Image (cartoon, grey):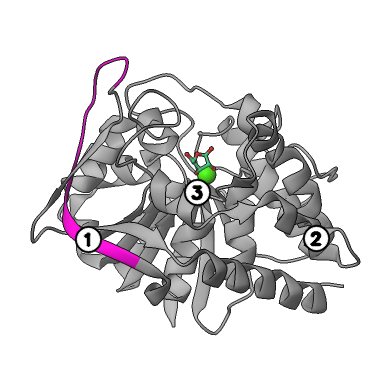
């Protein structure tokens, strides 16, 4: 059983990942959510996770994190995630509220009490960069950071960079230079482990969680449909699937460096194979990935009626 904290900017794919984690309480103990500005503003993404908690009637503490990157300005992505950051489902609220201490303070407190925590980072790394700047000693208490971010070939936000790393490259560099064990799901493995658009039709059926997932995909898939693709990556799902079933993935060990500047290269991740602290997921068993995801949503339909 791994204890995990999910650092997130929901985000359609963030929610798919979180749902899949929730479906596996015997493997993953989800302690809390820490939100961060990324896909949308901090207030919007925090509201989004609270709305999901209201919808499912669950209580997992939510800590609001950093509202802008360490150096750059916020650059929300309404084309990918809508004005709310989670367009599609029409959810009221939220009624639930975030905790009163910040995500960075929470990390300091929980990491001083708990050993061996895994942080699953599905968003820009501003919270972790800030934490490591303020309290570098906490790294001893982090078992691993498993994150969605980076690209080996081409980017999705500039020529070479992936959005999460590009949004706060300085924070990403602090994490990658920290010596903490980091496992990375870059764009390519997320494409390899993606969902066929026709497979998303399976969620058009009875079931409270299926309905939510259908409404999320209805908006999220537009990006792929507009480009004539027949599948889409569910980016943030991959780190959770990796934690649930490592052998779905091939991987390499080495070191990742982050470029901080350049129109085409800001946020680019350069991977060199060596005996480093970083593991990069290279390829995925797509059908195996989707089986876990589909079974997770089926199980949640049974649990949340
Ligand atoms: C990443 O950026 C966000 O839009 C997604 O939620 C994911 O974390 C993909 O580049
Ligand atoms: Ca995300």
Q: CA distance from mark 3 to mark 1?
A: 38 Å
Task: Tell me whether the residue at label 3 lies in contact with that at label 1, contact meaning CB atoms closer than 8 angstroms.
Answer: no
Q: Which image quadrant for residue 251? A: bottom left
The residue labelled by disc 3 is: 101
Q: Residues in magenta? A: 250-264
Residue 187 vs 273, above or below: the answer is above
SS assignment at label 3:
loop
Task: Say whether residue 258 is magenta.
Answer: yes
Quadrant location, the N terminus: bottom left
Residue at the extreme right: 206
Residue at 64% across, 26% down: 78
Residue holding disc 2: 203
Residue 296 part of the magenta-drawn span: no
Q: Residue at x 31, y 46 (%)?
A: 131
Label 2 neighbour load within 10 Å: few <14, some 14-19, many 20+:
some
Labels in figure, total: 3
Q: Main secondary structure of the magenta part?
A: strand
- Decide if residue 61 is in sight here: no
Q: Closer to us: mark 3 or mark 2? A: 2
């Amino acid at each position: 059983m791994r204890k995990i904290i999910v650092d997130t900017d929901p985000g359609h794919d963030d929610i798919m990942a979180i749902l899949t984690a929730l479906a596996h309480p015997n493997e993953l103990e989800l302690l809390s959510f820490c939100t961060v500005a990324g896909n949308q503003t901090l207030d919007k993404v925090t509201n989004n996770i609270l709305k999901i908690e209201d919808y499912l009637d669950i209580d997992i503490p939510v800590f609001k994190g950093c509202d802008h990157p360490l150096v750059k300005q916020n650059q929300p992505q309404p084309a990918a995630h809508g004005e709310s950051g989670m367009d599609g489902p029409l959810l009221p609220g939220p009624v639930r509220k975030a905790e009163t201490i910040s995500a960075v303070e929470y990390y300091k407190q929980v990491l001083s009490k708990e050993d061996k925590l895994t942080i699953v980072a599905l968003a820009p790394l501003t919270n972790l960069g800030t934490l490591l700047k303020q309290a570098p000693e906490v790294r001893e208490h982090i078992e691993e950071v498993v994150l969605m971010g980076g690209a080996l070939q081409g980017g999705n936000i500039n020529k070479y960079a992936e959005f999460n790393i590009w949004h706060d490259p300085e924070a990403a560099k602090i994490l990658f230079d920290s010596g903490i064990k980091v496992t990375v799901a870059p764009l390519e493995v997320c494409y390899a482990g993606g969902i066929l658009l026709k497979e998303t039709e399976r969620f058009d059926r009875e079931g409270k969680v299926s309905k939510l997932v259908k409404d999320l995909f209805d908006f999220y898939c537009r990006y792929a449909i507009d480009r004539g693709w027949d599948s889409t990556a569910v980016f943030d799902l991959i780190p959770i699937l990796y934690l649930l079933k490592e052998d779905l993935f091939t991987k390499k060990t080495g070191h990742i460096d982050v470029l901080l500047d350049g129109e085409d290269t800001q946020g680019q991740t350069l991977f060199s194979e060596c005996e480093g602290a970083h593991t990069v997921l290279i390829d995925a068993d797509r059908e195996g990935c989707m089986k876990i995801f589909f079974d997770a949503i089926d199980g949640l339909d049974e649990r949340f009626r």
